[in-house]
Amino acid sequence: HGRDDILKMLIEQGADVCASAQSGMTPLLASLNGMHHSTTKIFLDQESIKRCINYTDREGTNVLSLANDIHADQEIIEKLIELGAEPK
C-alpha cells in the first residue's frame, strides 16, 4: 500500500509530482493503477498536478481513461475532470 506520510514529506521537500518514468508513467498514473485511493487524493490536492493532468504513458493511457477503466471512485473521477483531465 501507499505510504502517505512519506509521500507528503517528499512533496513538502519539493518532489516533482509530474515526474515520469521512461514508460511515461507518472506518480498519479501509478497510484491510480495500484488503486491507492488515499495516495491518489494526495496527488490531486497538489496545485502543480494540473501541469500533468493529461500526460499519457507510452500506450496512450491518461488518468481519466485509466480511472474509468478501473472503475475508480466517482469522487476521484469528478476531481480529475475538475482539474482539466480529458478523455484520451
Image (spheres, rainbow, N blue to C red):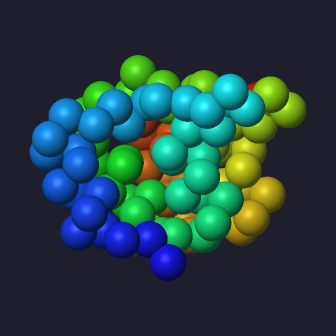
Image-based side of 59 in relation to 7, left or right: right
Q: Residue at x 63, y 66 (%)?
A: 34
Q: In the orientation shown, which residue stands out farthest toward the right? A: 59
Considering only vertical position in the picture, is 11 above or below 5? above
Q: Residue at x 45, y 58 (%)?
A: 40
Q: Position of residue 73 (x, y in %)?
A: 56, 70
Q: Position of residue 56 (x, y in %)?
A: 69, 28
Q: Is residue 34 visible?
A: yes
Q: How many marks?
A: 0
Considering only vertical position in the picture, is 72 above or below 65? below
Q: Residue at x 61, y 32 (%)?
A: 21
Image-based side of 44 in relation to 21, left or right: left
Q: Is residue 85 visible?
A: no
Q: Nearer the viewer, residue 48 or 1?
A: 1
Q: Position of residue 3 (x, y in %)?
A: 36, 71
Q: Residue at x 46, y 30 (%)?
A: 19
Q: In the orientation shown, which residue stands out farthest toward the top? A: 51
The image quadrant of residue 51 is top left
Image-based side of 58 in relation to 45, left or right: right
Q: Nearer the viewer, residue 21 or 51?
A: 21
Considering only vertical position in the picture, is 46 above or below 7? above
Q: In the orientation shown, which residue stands out farthest toward the left? A: 12
The image quadrant of residue 72 is bottom right
Q: Quadrant of the C terminus?
A: top right
